[in-house]
Image: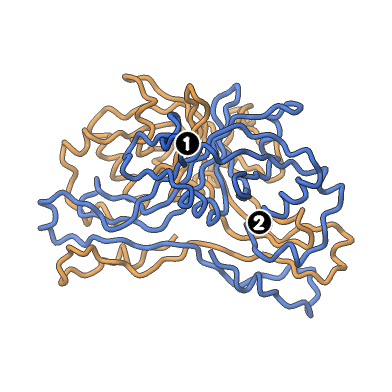
Chain colours: A orange, B blue
């Protein structure tokens, strides 16, 4: 993601393998929109902690389903977070172990997150998170109760300080290793979707809706 | 994971939803052995940072393919890390949005990581990481060169301070919502494996080996 002057902010600059770095907003948004889980890092008095959390992007904002972070929030104050979303696209199988790698796309967002206090915004943020995970689910469920909205913690943070890192394509081996008869290439991996399992308490005449049968990522 | 007195160490105790927490060593090892990527959190002068890294468990030790952390390491000193591995098993589809969730298994390991200096241990650690990602790959590739081993950073940390968190099973809805005609259940998800893509420079008579065609997770 770019600053107004066209450069990435200093702390978000990718120092390792800068040729894999992208600051382009579309690339960042695409990765954030495809991911399911974010790994959220915080600093605690006992050291760093990383927790998997549900999230969604809403324009320039990232919403986090925030209960796991609640113990770090003190009345109205924000918390410094690093939110990382990684998608694994394949195993890169090289002729030497040293050049094995993964094809992946990842985004790192840094900044201060604050709880969403306004109930209307919070209710909408919960809908955005639900739609991010299962598009079409909001229209299929009853509205939130006020108690549910009040009892949920949602954090919001800006995506202004973010970068993407992408690796794709075949392995890059040492030139002399191309003469070896070792197989090399890429094993693509993605998300496999199984058969929906109805809740044991579901009435047998309630069909699986299309937003579940057609769910893909 | 348990201390000698049978209790989890204080900072690793799961405060949110403690009923989902497990400190059992076998559960922790199983999750670590199944994961592909770890999300590693560190504290930098600019705040927390979370980076996806390759890793492997070797008995009581966790090895991390450490290049992304290299800028945090200062001659021989260790670095405080939080290593989180998350496996997503399914989307939990409830009758109300508030009770939507994910079925997942995750492990959090906290502690100080240090670079592996001994070349024999480091070479073996690289093999352990390779075998973790693609079992059978070490036997199919040439040995590491000394230059490759020297040029790679491997971090080691103890798994003594770790906890697992697991959610499984159907959604838990509000009692009155079970009367709704909303579909509810679980959509299982896992890792899909595609067809191996040979390196464009691979000789056409080199067959795809079994450790690639049979790779599953």
Residue shown at the point (16%, 49%) measured from the top left: B174
Q: Secondary structure at mark 1?
A: loop
For disc 2, the marked residue is A168
Whether residue A18 is visible: no
Q: Residues within 10 Å of mark 1 (few under 14, many from 20)?
A: few
For image coordinates 13% across by 53% down, the residue present is: B177
Q: Residue A171: give x, y in percent of width and height.
A: 74, 59
Q: Which mark is residue A214?
A: none
Q: Pinpoint residue A125: horizontal percent, then vertical percent.
A: 31, 39
- In this rendering, the label closer to the viewer, 1 or 2: 1
Q: Quarter-wise, where is residue B165 in the image?
A: top left
Q: Taking A42 as reference, is B121 left or right? A: right
Pick whichever, B10 or B96, lies toward us: B10
Q: Is residue B143 left or right of residue B65?
A: right
Q: Secondary structure at mark 2?
A: loop
The residue positioned farthest toward the bottom in the image shown: B205
The Cα–Cα distance between marks 1 and 2, rounded to whole angstroms, is 43 Å
The answer to whether residue B23 is above or below residue A173 is above
Q: Residue at x 84, y 57 (%)?
A: A174
* Residue A160, image x, y percentages: 50, 32
Q: Chain of mark 1?
A: B
User: Neighbour class for label 2 at 10 Å: few (<14), some, many (≥20)?
Assistant: some
| Tag 1 and tag 2 share a subunit | no
Residue position marked by numbered label 1 in the rendering: B3
The chain to which mark 2 is attached is A
**Count of numbered labels shown in the rendering:** 2
Q: Quadrant of residue A209?
A: bottom left
Q: Position of residue A179 (x, y in %)?
A: 87, 68
């Amino acid at each position: 993601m770019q600053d107004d002057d066209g450069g990435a902010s200093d702390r978000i600059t990718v120092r390792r393998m800068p040729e894999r770095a992208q600051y382009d907003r579309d690339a960042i948004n695409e990765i954030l929109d495809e991911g399911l889980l974010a790994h959220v890092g915080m600093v605690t008095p006992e050291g760093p902690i990383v927790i998997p959390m549900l999230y969604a992007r809403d324009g320039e904002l990232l919403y986090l389903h925030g209960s796991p972070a609640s113990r770090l929030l003190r009345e109205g104050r924000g918390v410094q977070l690093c939110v990382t979303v990684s998608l694994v696209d394949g195993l890169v199988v090289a002729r030497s172990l040293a050049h094995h790698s993964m094809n992946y796309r990842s985004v790192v967002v840094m900044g201060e997150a604050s709880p969403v206090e306004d109930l209307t915004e919070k209710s909408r943020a919960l809908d955005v998170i639900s739609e991010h995970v299962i598009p079409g689910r909001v229209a299929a469920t009853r509205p939130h109760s006020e108690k549910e909205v009040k009892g949920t913690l949602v954090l919001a943070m800006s995506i202004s300080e973010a970068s993407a890192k992408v690796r794709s394509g075949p392995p890059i081996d040492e030139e002399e290793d191309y003469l070896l008869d070792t197989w090399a290439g890429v094993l693509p991996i993605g998300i496999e979707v199984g058969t929906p399992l109805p809740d044991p308490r579901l009435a047998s005449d309630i069909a699986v809706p299309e937003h579940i049968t057609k769910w893909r990522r």
